[in-house]
Amino acid sequence: MSYESLENDGVDDIKIELGKYTGDRNEKGERHGQGQAVLPNGDQYEGQYRNGRRHGFGKYKFVGKKAR
């Protein structure tokens, strides 16, 4: 699992579980370029990232949800 640390008034760190990620990263270690992620709830994303965020084209698969 990968985690992202967020500052909380300089007192403590909050860590958010981002799931498993395979793909490109930038010099800061952020998701950047083409990649695949499996989120903690089982959802899946395959596509482009920019500076740690989904950006551009990609496919998001919701697990356990039926399309209407």
Image (cartoon, rainbow, N blue to C red):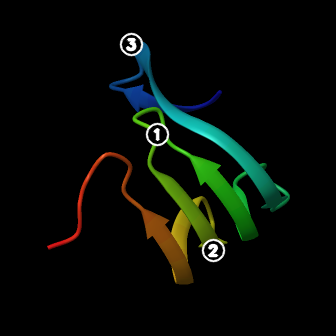
Question: Residue 11's spot in the image, x, y percent?
Answer: 39, 13
The amino acid sitting under disc 3 is Val
The tag on residue 47 is 2
Using residue 8 as the reference point, say whether residue 22 is left or right of it. right
In this rendering, which labeled residue sits more in front, label 2 or label 1? 1
Badge 2 crowding class, 10 Å Cα cut-off, few under 14, some 14 to 19, many 20 or more, is: some
The label shown at residue 20 is none
Instruction: Work out whether 13 lies above or below 52.
Output: above
| Quadrant placement of the C terminus | bottom left
Q: In the picture, which quadrant includes the N terminus? A: top right
Q: Nearer the viewer, residue 39 or 56?
A: 39
- Identity of the amino acid at label 1? Gly
Look at discs 3 and 1 and give the one toward the viewer: 1
Badge 3, how many Cα within 10 Å: few under 14, some, many 20+?
few
- Residue at left 44%, top 49%? 43
In the picture of the structure, the residue carrying the numbered disc 3 is 11
